[in-house]
Image: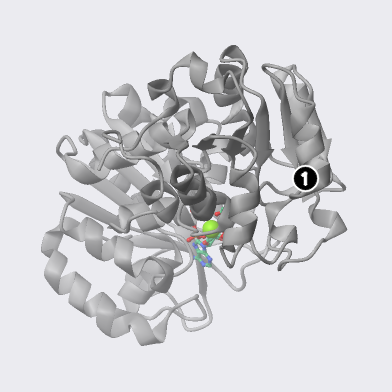
Amino acid sequence: MPKKSLADLPASAFADGVTVVRFDLNTPLENGSVADDTRLRAVLPTLAALHGLEARCVLLSHLGRPGGQPAPGLSLRPVAERLSELSGRRVEFVPAVEGPELEAAALGLGPGEALLAENTRFLPGETTNDPALAGSWAGLGSVYVNDAFGAAHRAHASTEGVARAVRSKGGTAVAGPLMERELRFLGEVTSEPARPFVAVLGGAKISGKIDVVEALLERVDRLIIGGAMANTFFLALGLETGNSLVEEDRVPLARTLLERAGDRLMLPIDVRVADALSDAATVRDVERAHVGPSDVIGDIGPRSVRLFTEALAGARTVLWNGPMGVFEMANFAAGTVELARGVADATSAGALTVVGGGDSAAAVRAAGVEERISHVSTGGGASLEFLAGASLPGVEALSDRED
Ligand code: ADP
Ligand code: 3PG
Ligand code: MG
């Protein structure tokens, strides 16, 4: 059922009371400041829209996994500072998650102003979806905006509980612009993709993405598998994988998938190997049948890069999730960087291209092609669950358009 969005609300909805906004500002910190501001930049249009509506905003987010108690290294204070710099408007930090201090600060907000509360996961009730905690946020106002796509797969107090609590007291819970954009692009890929539809999966493990592989297999014209995920398929083909990362217990699954997929499934034909996965290792490119017992596979080889980018060249829809190798190390980055360029070139040739997954998004940025991808999702786990066909509790809890 379609959900209400921010654009469905009249400006008068923001005239009285506070608007509670959930963002996913879960961002890596280094030495007390934001190390990657991608998720912050992604919510700037939403902040600008709320400012334009003269909303008084209490912003909520989690950061890391503090386990229900305060952790000084996981305070959102540096995030508020960065958000103020990026938006050009002060986002006041309030060192309280809920309660009188937050309420007082919220009451002091003027039209168009925003404050950021402390990390929601500093309280145990966040992840247990405690109705009392959700109710305390719902008590702040009658409009709730969920723009935290990256956390939409979590049924937590600040994502699911608060939406239901706001609605049960007669208020409205809507999707923010970033949430809408994510659902639109990922929805387009999963529902009616223009064909040929080529999906590329990679990364560390099949086990984390089985549901995605199975869901996509039914829908794609071509499924390309690289990264360590491919190694388990190599085992299923009876090939030597040396000391590479493999999941022995998933070999039967890989065999079944190979049979079901037929020639729709494409694996690397050559690989980049070394004695160890290290920055200093000397690498060799070998045919996949020539991996030695003491080799470790760290990347796809150059012939595979050509094969995969050729498959991308004819695509009209491309979905990419999971790096082709250990792209964090320069000597194993080429396959992932070339693939990112291939996806960007497909966009230029008219394809709709979508990249999901935290590491894949980082790889796209590292390759310098972020602007040349139709949509780079801000969701890691959330985008995988969506692609596997799961419904997202943070979205389900929002007001229906007909309400
Ligand atoms: P995403 O976050 O995009 O969903 P994953 O988390 O599934 O991606 O996988 C990313 C990780 O997979 C990276 O840290 C990368 O180093 C690792 N990886 C990719 N290929 C290999 C390989 N051949 N051997 C070991 N690790 C690999
Ligand atoms: C993410 O980074 O994937 C989201 O912020 C969700 O974080 P979580 O996996 O700790 O719930
Ligand atoms: Mg990852």
Let me know if residue 142 appears in the view: yes
Q: State the residue position of label 1.
A: 76
Ligand 2, seen in the image, is in the quarter at bottom right
Q: Residue at x 84, y 45 (%)?
A: 95
Residue 277 in picture, x, y percent from top left: 61, 68
Q: Is residue 283 left or right of residue 403?
A: right
Picture quarter with the N terminus: top left
Q: Is residue 353 left or right of residue 128?
A: left
Q: Residue furthest front?
A: 169
Let me know if residue 309 appears in the view: no
Residue 45 in picture, x, y percent from top left: 55, 21
Picture quarter with the C terminus: top left
Q: Residue at x 36, y 75 (%)?
A: 232
Amino acid marked by disc 1: Leu
358 shown above or below 288: above
319 or 299, which is in the foreground? 319
The local crowd at label 1, few if under 14, some if 14 to 19, many if 20 or more residues have their Cα within 10 Å, is many
Secondary-structure class at tag 1: loop
